[in-house]
Image: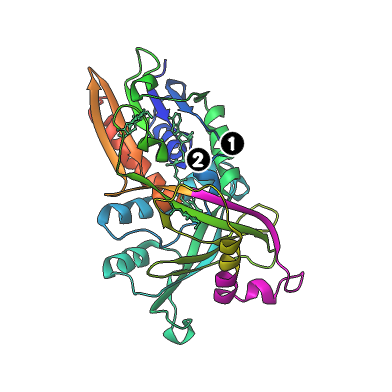
């Protein structure tokens, strides 16, 4: 009896499913359909390639600020449900710098809820920086956390089925299916039904290095670039170095010149990576990967569509570069919309 079908098993589909359980929906009434599941890798599956931490990457419109805040303040609930930090979700200090000072709305919002928040004194800014803050972030071991989230949901009775959808209506897998959540990320660009031409990729490349001596995050936001260093928890000392934000670029290949540029920018921003490296000035590169952030002109789409008598699709996609850090708030909104006319809730 699949009353609820979640299409897509990236972080957005999994957060949405977790939130359905939070709202008291019987897990046995939920099926997750997807082409790719945790453990799989594909350029069409963004979630395993995220850095991923909670950062100040997002915009400053009220909805996005809410999605960030909701996620930040509710992650401890997910961490606890999954058995603690060893699920691949832990906390480290983040230092963030901007070349252009962010808006008052953004700063006020962050200052109101981030733990251990403080503004860095301008004397300490790298050259060209206008503003800097420090706070306690959430760090994800993305591939491992995805897997643990799926196992948790599966153990609670949620069904997972591998399927390639060519049309939206295929997600109505039984006559009992009432609500479909469309969490297909970049897939929404070409899926049959309502092809969303506002969806586009923002390509990133990251370099994963071994760095037992780094246990914090550092980032710098420029006008047309982003440089970041993210500690990956419970990963045998992996550190993620990035990055790139290439709009409308579908390339899955990785490039040596981009790897070199990333290493040069990150070690300049945070010299400790090299200075305190146990292997001297030679960094051990474990992996180089490219990923496509599922972006959308007009921002994320969280909308309810009536597609038949008592049949609805709730769209929840377009998380771009912030699925982990804002996605639980997106899930809250999507589930709220889904259940709004359901008298039981
Ligand atoms: C390099 C890089 C760094 C990033 N760093 C961060 C970070 O630090 N913090 C952060 O919050 N975010 C980060 N992100 C962004 C984050 O990865 C994305 O926002 C998030 O993964 C999007 O999740 P999603 O579930 O929407 O999409 P996806 O993970 O792409 O999942 C889509 C799902 O839909 C399924 N699907 C699609 N089409 C179909 C179909 N036709 N039939 C069946 N199934 C289908 C897929 O198989 C998959 O299961 C980063 C991304 C990249 C690339
Ligand atoms: C919509 O998606 C389908 C399935 O991928 C594809 O065949 C079709 O060409 C797309 N249409 C448009 C207008 O992009
Ligand atoms: C998801 O939304 C997109 C864009 O509206 C649409 O093309 C696609 O068919 C939808 N997919 C599902 C499974 O709902
Ligand atoms: C995509 O990015 C790669 C790497 O930066 C670059 O070589 C390529 O030319 C880009 N492609 C397009 C279509 O912009």
Q: Give the percent coordinates (x, y) of residue 233.
A: 61, 54
Which residue appears at 57% of the width and 76% of the height? 268
Q: Give the percent coordinates (x, y) of residue 210.
A: 69, 60
Q: Give the percent coordinates (x, y) of residue 264.
A: 59, 71
Which residue appears at 75% of the width and 73% of the height? 280
- Range of the magenta residues? 264-291
Which mark sits nearer the N-terminus, 1 or 2? 1
Q: Is residue 124 left or right of residue 276?
A: left
Q: Nearer the viewer, residue 145 or 211?
A: 211
Residue at mark 2: 45
Query: Can you name the residue that lies furthest to the right here?
Result: 279
Q: Nearer the viewer, residue 307 or 140?
A: 307
Badge 1 residue CB within 8 Å of ligand 1: yes
Q: Is residue 78 visible?
A: yes
Which residue appears at 60% of the width and 66% of the height? 260
Q: Which quadrant of the view contains residue 198?
A: top left
Q: Give the percent coordinates (x, y) of residue 1.
A: 42, 15
Q: Are marks 1 and 2 in contact (CB under 8 Å)?
A: yes
SS of the residue at dot 2? loop
Residue at mark 1: 40
Q: Nearer the viewer, residue 158 or 167?
A: 167
């Amino acid at each position: 009896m699949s009353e609820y079908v979640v299409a897509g098993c990236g972080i957005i589909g999994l957060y949405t499913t977790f939130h359905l359980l939070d709202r008291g929906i019987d897990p046995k009434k939920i099926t997750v359909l997807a082409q790719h599941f945790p453990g799989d890798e594909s350029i069409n599956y963004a979630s395993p390639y995220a850095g991923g931490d909670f950062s100040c990457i997002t915009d400053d419109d009220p909805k996005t600020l809410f999605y960030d805040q909701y996620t930040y303040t509710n992650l401890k609930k997910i961490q606890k449900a999954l058995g603690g930090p060893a699920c691949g979700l832990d906390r480290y200090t983040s230092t963030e710098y901007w070349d252009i000072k962010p808006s008052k709305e953004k700063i006020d919002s962050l200052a109101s809820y981030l733990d251990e928040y403080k503004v860095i004194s301008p004397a300490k800014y790298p050259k060209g920086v206008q503003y800097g803050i420090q706070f306690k972030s959430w760090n994800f071991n993305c591939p491992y956390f995805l897997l643990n989230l799926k196992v948790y949901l599966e153990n609670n009775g949620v069904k997972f089925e591998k399927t390639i959808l060519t049309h939206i209506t295929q997600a109505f897998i039984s006559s009992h299916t009432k609500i479909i959540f469309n969490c297909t990320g970049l897939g929404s660009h070409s899926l049959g039904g309502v092809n969303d031409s506002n969806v586009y990729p923002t390509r990133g490349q990251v370099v994963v290095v071994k760095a037992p001596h780094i246990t914090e995050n550092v980032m710098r936001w420029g006008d047309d670039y982003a440089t970041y260093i993210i500690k990956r928890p419970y990963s045998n000392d992996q550190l993620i170095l990035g990055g790139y934000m290439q709009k409308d670029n579908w390339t899955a290949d990785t490039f040596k010149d981009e790897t070199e540029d990333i290493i040069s920018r990150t070690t300049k921003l945070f010299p400790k990576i090299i200075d305190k490296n146990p292997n001297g000035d030679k960094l051990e590169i474990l992996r180089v990967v490219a990923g496509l952030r599922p972006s959308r002109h007009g921002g994320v789409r969280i909308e309810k569509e009536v597609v038949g008598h008592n049949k609805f699709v709730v769209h929840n996609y377009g998380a771009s570069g912030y699925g982990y850090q804002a996605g639980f708030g997106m899930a809250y909104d999507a589930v709220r919309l889904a259940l709004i006319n359901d008298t039981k809730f």
